[in-house]
Amino acid sequence: MDRTGQVHRGQRASRRAATVGLRSLLWWLGHGLVLAARCSAALRSQITRTLTVEISADDGPARHWDFDGQRRRVSTSAGRAAAPDFAVRFTSSCHALRDLISPDAIDAIMRDRIDGTVHVEGNHLLLMWFRGLLRAVVPIGGAGPSRRALPGTYVAHDPAANGVEKIVIESAVRQLDPRWTGAWNARAKLWIVRGTHGEPLREP
């Protein structure tokens, strides 16, 4: 009986630690993103819509972010949002901590959504967008570009190499030719390209 009591006490202590840990992580991510948006023009350029994002757990910890697409700003508050445009709700703080600090956070959340330990509400594309913003605060996951030059780079025409056909080098341009309607139609569907240039995006 005493052994069972020790196990239960250990489980309660573990749950309390996870709750405190998640609350601290959300506070840090919340205020870190607000500060990063004030200091980084690149990050502000990605805030093109007015919406609210929430991350919460059923055992208490919750935080939401309010994005202002007109002023390119973000604010944060503890607790659940009244009507979030996008929300990730975990069944426990333990699950939330495990998924949020995972190098493949999005994959982990999607797997747990199938298992029923995570509920995702709203457009799933917003999860990738929001994760990209959070990586400005905590660079978890996604290997950066290699700092070493790749071996055997082809920087000049070499007649001795395979493929001796003529290489056409086009002059650099800053925007697509207006007459190239197919390319402009394709570009209009690329949210990442449009968002980083500060263009308004349609509702999903």
Image (cartoon, rainbow, N blue to C red):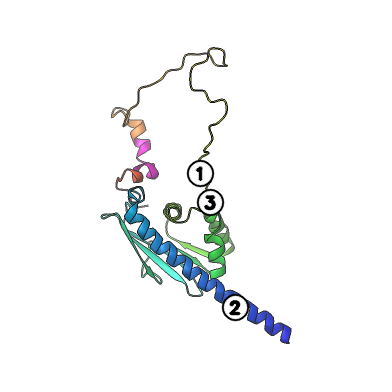
Q: Which residue is mark 1?
A: 144
Tell me: 165 left or right of 45: right
Kind of residue at disc 2: Ala
Kind of residue at disc 1: Gly
Q: Earlier in the sequence, mark 3 or mark 2?
A: 2
Label 1–label 2 contact, CB within 8 A? no
Of residues 196 and 152, the one nearer the viewer is 152
Look at the numbered disc 2 and give the secondary structure of its residue: helix
Q: Which residue is mark 3?
A: 141
Judge whether residue 193 is colored magenta.
yes
Give residue 189's mark: none
Estimate how packed mark 2 is, as few (under 14), some (14 to 19) or many (20 or more) residues with alpha carbons within 10 Å. Answer: few
The answer to whether residue 117 shows anywhere in this view is no
Residue 192 vs 13, above or below: the answer is above
Question: Where does the magenta region start and end?
Answer: 185-194
**Distance of label 1 from label 2 (alpha carbons):** 37 Å
Q: Main secondary structure of the magenta part?
A: helix
Residue 171 vs 80, above or below: the answer is above
Residue at 38% across / 45% down in the picture?
191
Q: Which residue is mark 2?
A: 13
Judge whether residue 154 is colored magenta.
no
Q: Position of residue 96 (x, y in %)?
A: 53, 65
Estimate how packed mark 3 is, as few (under 14), some (14 to 19) or many (20 or more) residues with alpha carbons within 10 Å. Answer: few
Q: From this viewpoint, which residue is outermost toward the bottom?
A: 1
Residue 68 vs 196, above or below: the answer is below
When asked about the image quadrant of residue 77, the answer is: bottom left
